Image (cartoon, helix red, strand yellow):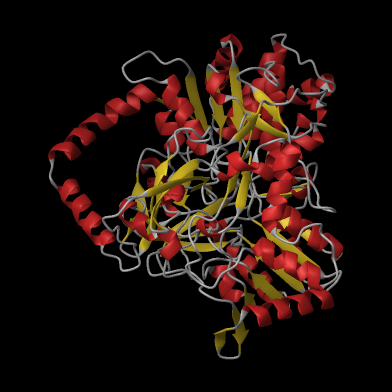
Amino acid sequence: MLNRRAFLSFSAGATVGLMITPIPWKLTDDASIWTQNWKWNPKVPKRAIYFAEMASKMDPSGAGIRVASVEGCPVGVAGNPDHPMGKGAVSAMAAAEIGLLYSPSRVKTPMVRTESGFAPISWEKAEAMLTEKLGEARGRVAMVSGDETGSANEIFNALVANLEGEFFMMPGEAQSAARSWKMMGGEGQIGYDIENADHVLFLGADALESSGTAVRNARAFSATHPSGKEALAKYVYAGPVLNSTATVCDEWVQARPGMAATVAMGLANILMSEGMTAAFSGFDAFRAEAAAFTPARVERETGVRARDLMRMAAELRSARRPLVVAGSEFGQGAGARAVLASLGLNAVLGRIGAEGGVKAVAEAPVVVPGAASRSEMFQADFVAFMQKVAEGRADVDVLMVYDANPAYGLPQAEMMAKALEKVPFTVSFSSFMDETAKTADLILPSSMPVERYDDVYTPYGAAESCYNVNRPIAKAAFDTRHTADVLLGAASRMGMDLGFIAFKDVLKAKTVALGASWGDLKKGQTWTAAAAPVRQLNIAACAVPSVEPAGNGALALAPVAKSHLGNGKIAIPPSNVSTIRDTEFDGSDCMVQMNAKTARMSGVKAGQKVRLSGPGGEMLAKVCITEKVMNGVVAAPLGFGHTAWDEFSCGMGDNAYKLLAAVAEPETGLTAWSGTRVEIATA
């Protein structure tokens, strides 16, 4: 166990050394000059600068940004201090929103696959081809969307439903929470009132990088830890790596990857054995199942020492407004067990529906006829579906992919890519030539967020409802269209009535349904509403079994997500290349991290090239020795190993998603892949 004070003391000497040497400042200056000279970067003329407010669509937090434009050309991004999800802060992905507008990897016009590769095609012919294929494939159509906050999903879902097909959302923390909340009988979606909590325990969830509203979470930490003053809250992180969240927390408790559910059950058992109860049905069943999670068992399965578990439980009990947030260490693959167990623990602490606790946030009203609600859309499991496609057990002739890159950013990535190739006709709506677009039969490039009408409704983790409408700030740089309008047109040509002709009208209807002002939203203002009351829940569903790791390797794999390295659907933004550390990438190889003891046990040395093998596949990397990783764990960065995109990400390192193996959670109906074990050997 390493607390925050010890870590800061340990790193102080290194920090002072870096400050007094001129080397990093020279490198920073060189990098600045280098990135400014890229030919696709817009040059700022000496004219008036116009600012427009919007909510970032590339940042999963949905944080508000101010886009600077000169004569209709966006040239930069700043934070919006009036937006509740960021309050002036900007994530690495939101900061890249404008730079990627001019990326050399953008798809500039519709493309169709021919015998000799991709060839340009007009929108009229492309839309006619799409309509024909969809009509022929009725009953054998599927679509997946990676947009967790947009109303465009209502159009997609209603269209696919009319075609008697299947609609999926890309897996992530929001899906885990939606499934958990529904199993408990909850309504709406869950949020975490971090700002008003005085003791926050993060179980696995990397709250400052990949879990929930990361930008908002960082702001909450800053507010409760004022510089030079006593902290107003205690933050504790339990996980395998001293990641971004663990680094700033007041305490890091080492716990093996994917074991958040077991830790939560152990804590709940201690508290209930001391007399704490929960005012929800199913409490007796939850207590009976949790009794098996003794401190000794938790230590054996997770690596969390029994005495630390007892102390953590005592601190939660003594806090006035404690909060437990659980999830995957890298933002996906936790299934529903971790969230369920943590909600049971929050219920025992009396924190569901309370200030500084777990909130119930109302869902957005559905305005497209025949569309499902957001929580209903999250119930279908796309990874399980793709496994069936790979095995030839899914009857699908047309697969449409929007705002997602399943050929790269899912477990067993090589298998997922092969599954996509088995689909007779794949349509990609990607703005970029990513791995999925590269395998598609038809590419209908979507306009970028600043080029289209779009919206953002309450990102997962937000403690209150919020809604933003984005209007076009710039004309489309290339021959692109918004996918929502493209599919509304396809529906009309097939004789379907989805209730709207243009996506802009959907947003207006959503505004009316919420009771918001269209004029205010068009100006970039945010509509907000307080959390809804929590109705009776059944916490018997929170009694989950321990997670069984996938594979029998000697080491537990801890994937690490970093926003400056992109995410599962966006590659490393060119402007972020200079931020990659030598502990993440060296030469042409990404770096996997382990501590000295684990390296000796594995027979590898610092800088040595190694091969990691897991049940999902293999990857090559170099070894970085660091004490920021617990014993028996190897940490692998996500974001490398692209086989598409541009020169700034294609061919850089290897893809750690290949190692991950998905296993079923029978009681939740989801698949999970946060607990993979691997072998390591010299390459």
**Residue lying at 31% horizontally and 17% vertically, measured from the top left:** 228
Question: How many marks are shown on the rendered structure?
Answer: 0
Picture coordinates of residue 449, whole percent (x, y): 54, 56
**Residue lying at 83% horizontally and 78% vertically, measured from the top left:** 136
Extreme residue in the bottom direction: 115
- Say whether residue 252 is visible: no
**What quarter of the picture does the N terminus occupy?**
top left
Quarter location, residue 498: bottom right
- Residue 197 against residue 559 in the figure, above or below: above
**Residue lying at 79% horizontally and 67% vertically, measured from the top left:** 491
Picture coordinates of residue 489, whole percent (x, y): 74, 68
Asked if residue 141 lies left or right of residue 523, the reply is: right
Picture coordinates of residue 419, whole percent (x, y): 68, 70
Viewer-side residue, 417 vs 297? 417
Asked if residue 192 lies left or right of residue 275, the reply is: left
Asked if residue 11 lies left or right of residue 332, the reply is: left
Quarter location, residue 13: top left
- Residue 375 against residue 608 in the figure, above or below: above
- Say whether residue 317 is visible: yes
Picture coordinates of residue 619, whole percent (x, y): 48, 62
- Residue 150 against residue 277 in the figure, above or below: below
- Residue 357 against residue 115 in the figure, above or below: above
**What quarter of the picture does the C terminus occupy?**
bottom left
